[in-house]
Amino acid sequence: MIDPKPASYRPAPLIEPGHTFGTITDKISAVVLSGRQPLSWIIVVSIGFMLVGMLGMAVTYLLVKGTGIWGINIPVGWGFAIINFVWWIGIGHAGTLISAILLLLKQGWRTSINRFAEGMTIFAVMCAGLFPLIHTGRPWLAAYWLFPYPNSMSIWPQFRSPLIWDVFAVSTYFTVSLLFWYVGLIPDMATLRDKARSVWVKRAYGFLALGWRGSARHWQRYEHIYLLLAGLSTPLVLSVHTVVSFDFAIGIVPGWHATIFPPYFVAGAIYAGFAMVLTLAIPLRKIYGLEDFITIRHLENMGKVTLLTGMIVGYGYMSEAFFGFYSANKYEGFMILNRMFGPYWFIYWILIFCNIITPQWLWIRRVRTSPLGLFLVAMVVNVGMWLERFVIVVTSLHRDFLPSSWGMYYPTIWDWMTFVGTIGMFLMLFFLFVRLLPMISIFEMRTMAPEARLQKGESH
Amino acid sequence: MAYGADTPPGVYGLMAEFETPTALVEAAKKTYAAGYRKIDTFSPYPIEEAWEAIGHHDRRMSLVVLGGGLAGLLTGVGLQEWVHQLAYPINVAGKPLNSWPQFVPVAFELTILFAALAAVIGMVVLNGLPMPYHPVFNVPRFEHASRDRFFLLVEAVDPQFDRRATLDFLKELNAAEVNEVEP
């Protein structure tokens, strides 16, 4: 159980005592409306902005010269672009998991973290989507490769290809996440509209709030579709990383052609996503003084989910190694030995250290309830999950069936600039979001306030 | 509409303000029991008891979402079958032209996409949004409806509405304040 309520120990509260509807509203909306931002906000956005400039340079040079500027070549035709794509899309999974699956499971603690986790999802999927697009080298042609529209050549995409499934899965995921996020924001936009004092700020939020006035008739339909959206997003979020894993598993390359891939990828995605939510939540609650709303209990629960999914990922690694030998297929067996002891051996063992050994610290309650401890574990997991994708993509491709076609893969400076550039883009978008929109769902937090409980007695 | 002699022409309704959700739900139940039907409540967060109290439950949203999902499924299946059997048949690894298991992922994604779009568009349209102007915003206190206060509105179009009688009725419901709503 993620969030048990045993009699023996009393977990930290979900919201610190003493808060009312008014204080919740003021505290969260002040971040947006006060107009003053802490110095750390300015520093992060500036760094992010500079890195976006670097990303722009790297992408421009790529479009001028072609993908030859990257380290990819045969046999490793899928280098950083696919590694980063899978890494970012994995990070994007935690947001929908928190907002949809935990909602259906009636996990009340999701309320403080769902909004910015959804924001994180959207920005991570934007970073992810960039990579396959620029990996085509000529993205302006990608329209007829990827989307079914009647073009002048009378040709159509190949729907039997997992790469086309990927296009549909990722674009659907992005659209539905954006809808879910926006629907959640409508009542909060109305709050900001009513609280703002400047006319233009009022108009901007009023435009986005669509004239929301909190009518009971509206709330009823709103709650109804919010639940339905959660129900729709739950299979969707599981399908997206399944389809991403099909990009590998449908192929016949040793190390990719494995039935464990879909569940193992989904668990890895949730693992990476929760690590990133922790990475963002721990500094945010400190910078903006939101410890009353994002309490130690939230951090501890996220630590538990990280530990659980980390164990599933560990099981995935073990079954990969087991099937490598149990299959009695010499290519599969060689692939595992090559991963562990081949030229990229150190990456494999750092990965095992990051993803399997480090999260074991989370068994200790003192680590789970310490923001610093959790932050360090989450950072290591972020690195580890990136290395996992490196191992899957590169070590499987670089030595396949024919020794005459073996080769090595080394990323170039352009690979690194593009990758680090997307981290900057993510940070910049995320911190702009924190500045412009309430990072915690105000109306859902009101339902957590003690006064929201109806007094029984006269009625019923 | 039975206006009193001193009724200003065209009042939209009367709005009572409450300090707690419990008071709002109580008042809404009593108002409904008194025979008023053109009533609405306004709250800063969803209160299930409030829409039950005013006798509102719209089940059409389920049908809208179901319709969206079915439309997406048909689009997904139809598009892929048409492309691969009629418009652009190619032999891939000797698979039959109707290799339907490979059409499942795209059909699934389109089902979800259309259902989600139907849900959001349906909610916005059935709620009559976007509606930048509404008479309730004319009540100065109403900006607290998105913060910490709870409001009950009786519209003037209600057959039972009488400016004086309704005002007195609302005042008896422990309302903190009762205001007229200008149209």
Image (cartoon, rainbow, N blue to C red):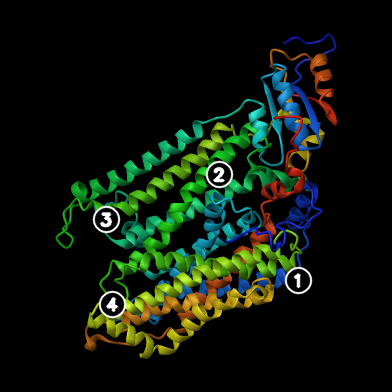
Q: Disc 4 marks which residue? A: A254
What distance separates the C-alpha of mark 2 from that of mark 3?
A: 31 Å
Residue that label 2 marks: A226
Please name the residue that numbered disc 1 is placed on: A39
Check disc 1: other Cα within 10 Å, few if <14, some if 14-19, many if 20+: few
Do the dots labelled 2 and 4 sit on one chain?
A: yes
User: In the rendered structure, the residue with mark 1 lies on which chain?
Assistant: A
Q: CA distance from mark 1 to mark 2?
A: 37 Å
Measured Cα–Cα span from mark 2 to mark 4? 43 Å
- The location of residue A363, given as percent across then percent down, is 59, 74
What's the distance in space between the residues labelled 1 and 3, CA to CA? 52 Å
For residue A177, side relative to residue A435 (left or right): left
Q: Quadrant of the C terminus of chain A?
A: top right
Amino acid marked by disc 4: Pro
Q: How many marks?
A: 4
Q: Is residue A450 left or right of residue A122?
A: right
Q: Mark 2 vs mark 4: which is more N-terminal?
A: 2
Give the residue at mark 3.
B102
Disc 1 to disc 2: CB gap under 8 Å: no
The type of residue carrying mark 2 is Tyr
